[in-house]
């Protein structure tokens, strides 16, 4: 994160957790497969799977990739727009993850974490454990609840 102050850029180290899952649910069937349903339909679940796979493969360097994926229209569009700069091997691994039970299991874990946190409004953000009202700009809330500014 970069905060502009007195003509200087100050780079800060911070921890963040992104959970790509909204209002939805996952079920486990008799064949031992997960099936997730998302509020905005199958495409949302597809894109959530790819985001969860990106987080799984790049636990410390996923923010740019999941930001690229967010809001796209199809999984294929996400593959072509967001994975093109990655190596062929990494692209194949992410595509395989996003189109198999591996990605669906990651969606399930995101669902569990979303439900466990008691999230009822999407998107939701907490800054140092304090709920972020999304009607305010992010930088204001970060400055209000941290000593970073």
Image (spheres, helix red, strand yellow):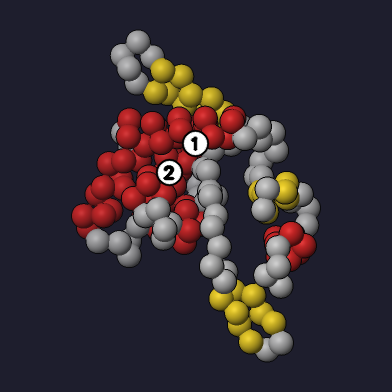
Res 87 quadrant in image: bottom left
* Left or right of residue 32: residue 39: right
For image coordinates 55% across by 55% down, the residue present is 16
Residue 125, placed above or below residue 84: above
Whether residue 41 is visible, yes or no, is no
What quarter of the picture does the N terminus occupy?
bottom right
Residue 40, placed above or below residue 144: above
* Left or right of residue 38: residue 129: right
Task: Tell me whether circle 2 and circle 1 mark residues in contact (CB < 8 Å).
Answer: yes
Whether residue 3 is visible, yes or no, is yes
- Residue 64 lies, in percent from the top left, at 47, 61
Q: Which residue bears the numbered disc 1?
A: 110
- Residue 50 lies, in percent from the top left, at 40, 45
What quarter of the picture does the C terminus occupy?
bottom right
Q: Which mark is residue 38?
A: none
Choose the circle earlier in sequence order: 2 or 1.
Answer: 2
Q: Which class describes the residues within 10 Å of circle 2: few (<14), some (14-19), or many (20+)?
A: many
How many marks on residues? 2
Q: Residue furthest bottom?
A: 7
For image coordinates 66% across by 32% down, the residue present is 118
* Left or right of residue 148: residue 1: left
For image coordinates 31% across by 14% down, the residue present is 31
Between marks 2 and 1, how big is the CA–CA gap? 8 Å
For image coordinates 38% across by 14% down, the residue present is 29
- Which of 28 and 112 lies nearest the eye of the viewer? 112
Q: Which residue bears the numbered disc 2?
A: 52
- Residue 48 lies, in percent from the top left, at 47, 41
- Which of 80 and 22 lies nearest the eye of the viewer? 22
């Amino acid at each position: 994160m970069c905060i502009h102050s007195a003509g200087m850029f100050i780079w800060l180290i911070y921890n963040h957790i992104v959970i790509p899952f909204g209002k939805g649910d996952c079920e486990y069937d008799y064949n031992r497969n997960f099936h997730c349903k998302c509020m905005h339909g199958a495409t949302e679940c597809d894109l959530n799977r790819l985001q969860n796979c990106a987080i799984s493969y790049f636990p410390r360097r996923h923010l740019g990739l999941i930001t690229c994926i967010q809001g796209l229209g199809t999984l294929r569009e996400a593959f072509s727009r967001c994975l093109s700069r990655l190596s062929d091997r990494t692209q194949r691994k992410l595509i395989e993850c996003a189109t198999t039970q591996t990605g669906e299991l990651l969606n399930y874990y995101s669902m569990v974490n979303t439900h466990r946190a008691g999230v009822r409004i999407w998107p939701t953000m907490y800054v140092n454990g304090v709920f972020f009202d999304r009607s305010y700009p992010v930088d204001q809330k970060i400055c209000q609840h941290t000593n970073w500014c």
